Image (cartoon, rainbow, N blue to C red):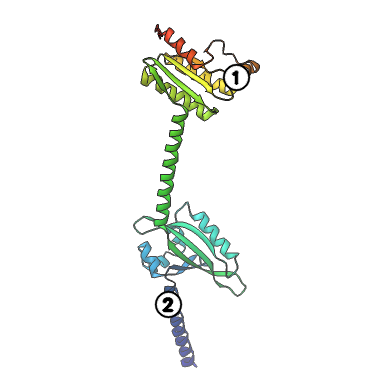
């Protein structure tokens, strides 16, 4: 009887080894980085040699990490979404795949991005998920490429935005001490701030004592635009520059009056030509034909 029991145990041991051998061969044929995670034990029970190679560990070293595997390998910022994916798999159908991208730490400390596809591998007798099969691909190079592309795109957009701002807030030096800033289009808070910065830079760069802001191309002057212009003029005055507003059309003049905006203390002229004549006179210059 004892001999029979021993024979049966040896048979089962041999059978288990054979199953493990088939298990290993099957996963190797997939050609990806494979692991099996035991939900009940909270640890990996199988790791392919290829996965260990990518991370710089042996497969057995990863398995020996036990339930500390997430602490040792997972990026802290990514752990919540990995945990969420594990929970989703436990509610999933047998043929459903849950995907997540997360960072895994190499033995050297370097982080590698993994595209992880999880699915149900085995269940308990009462139907609960026991083991999860994970198949990962190292997508670090792809992520690096995407990050670099995003960086370059943002750099291009920033440069384009700056170019547009410079075009929308040009500074035109006329003669020594006189600069013109012609404005075209609507003026919002962001553009108003850039107008002020550009004007102050222009005053410094050209040592201007007179600034002509021409608003012929500004279609609407409301209380907000008037406030922005007032702030710009105050900033110019702090730099020692006298400011002239030109290009005030009949419609804009009526709007300013209707809104009760007080520009009585500003030097305002109908058009740019009038502004230039006034600026020359202020500097004691004569215009001759």
Q: Which residue carries the number 2 mark?
A: 25
Which residue is at the front of the view, 58 or 119? Answer: 119
Which residue is at the front of the view, 52 or 265? Answer: 265
Q: Say few, some or many: other residues with alpha carbon within 10 Å of mark 2 (under 14 / 14 to 19 / 20 or more).
A: few
Q: Residue furthest right?
A: 258
- Residue 48 x, y percent position in the rendering: 41, 70
Q: Residue at x 42, y 73 (%)?
A: 28
Q: Say few, some or many: other residues with alpha carbon within 10 Å of mark 1 (under 14 / 14 to 19 / 20 or more).
A: some
- Residue 271 x, y percent position in the rendering: 52, 16
Q: Can residue 68 be seen?
A: no
Q: Which residue is drawn at 50% across and 24% down?
A: 183
Tag nearer the camera, 2 or 1: 1
Quadrant (top left, top right, bottom left, bottom right) of the C terminus:
top left
Q: Say how many tags the image has.
A: 2
Which quadrant of the view contains residue 252? Answer: top right
Is 206 placed above or below 112 here? Answer: above
Left or right position of 58 against 231? left
Q: Can residue 43 be seen?
A: yes
Is 55 placed above or below 171 here? Answer: below
Distance from disc 2 to disc 1, alpha carbons, whole Å, reads 82 Å
**Along the polypeptide, which appears first: circle 2 or circle 1?**
2
Which residue is at the front of the view, 52 or 117? Answer: 117
- Residue 182 x, y percent position in the rendering: 48, 23
Is 230 placed above or below 140 here? Answer: above
Q: Which residue carries the number 1 mark?
A: 252
Which quadrant of the view contains residue 72? Answer: bottom left
Q: Residue at x 42, y 79 (%)?
A: 21
- Secondary structure beneath dot 1 equals helix
Is 36 placed above or below 288 here? Answer: below
- Residue 282 x, y percent position in the rendering: 43, 8
Q: Which residue lies furthest to the front in this view?
A: 289
The answer to whether mark 2 and mark 1 are in CB contact below 8 A is no
């Amino acid at each position: 009887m004892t001999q029979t029991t021993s024979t049966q145990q040896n048979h089962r041991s041999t059978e288990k080894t054979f199953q493990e051998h088939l298990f290993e061969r099957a996963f190797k044929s997939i050609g990806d980085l494979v692991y099996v995670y035991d939900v009940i034990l909270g640890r990996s029970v199988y790791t392919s040699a290829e996965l260990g190679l990518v991370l710089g560990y042996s497969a057995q070293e990863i398995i020996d990490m036990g339930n500390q595997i997430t602490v040792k390998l997972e990026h802290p910022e990514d752990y919540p979404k990995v945990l969420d994916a594990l929970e989703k798999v436990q509610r999933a159908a047998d043929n459903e795949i849950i995907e997540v991208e997360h960072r895994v730490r190499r033995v050297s400390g370097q982080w590698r991005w993994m595209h992880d596809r999880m699915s149900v591998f085995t269940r308990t007798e009462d139907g609960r998920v026991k083991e999860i099969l994970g198949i990962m691909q190292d997508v670090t190079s792809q992520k690096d490429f995407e990050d670099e592309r995003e960086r370059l795109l943002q750099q291009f957009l920033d440069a384009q935005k700056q170019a547009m701002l410079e075009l929308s807030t040009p500074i035109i030096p006329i003669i020594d001490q006189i600069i013109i800033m012609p404005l075209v289009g609507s003026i919002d808070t962001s553009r108003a701030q850039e107008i002020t910065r550009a004007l102050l830079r222009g005053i410094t760069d050209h040592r201007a004592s007179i600034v002509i802001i021409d608003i012929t191309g500004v279609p609407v002057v409301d209380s907000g635009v008037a406030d922005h212009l007032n702030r710009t003029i105050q900033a110019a005055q702090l730099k020692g520059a006298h400011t002239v507003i030109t290009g005030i059309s009949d419609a804009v003049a009526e709007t300013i009056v209707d809104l009760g905006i007080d520009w009585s203390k500003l030097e305002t002229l109908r058009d740019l030509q009038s502004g230039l004549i006034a600026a020359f006179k202020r500097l004691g210059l004569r215009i001759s034909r």
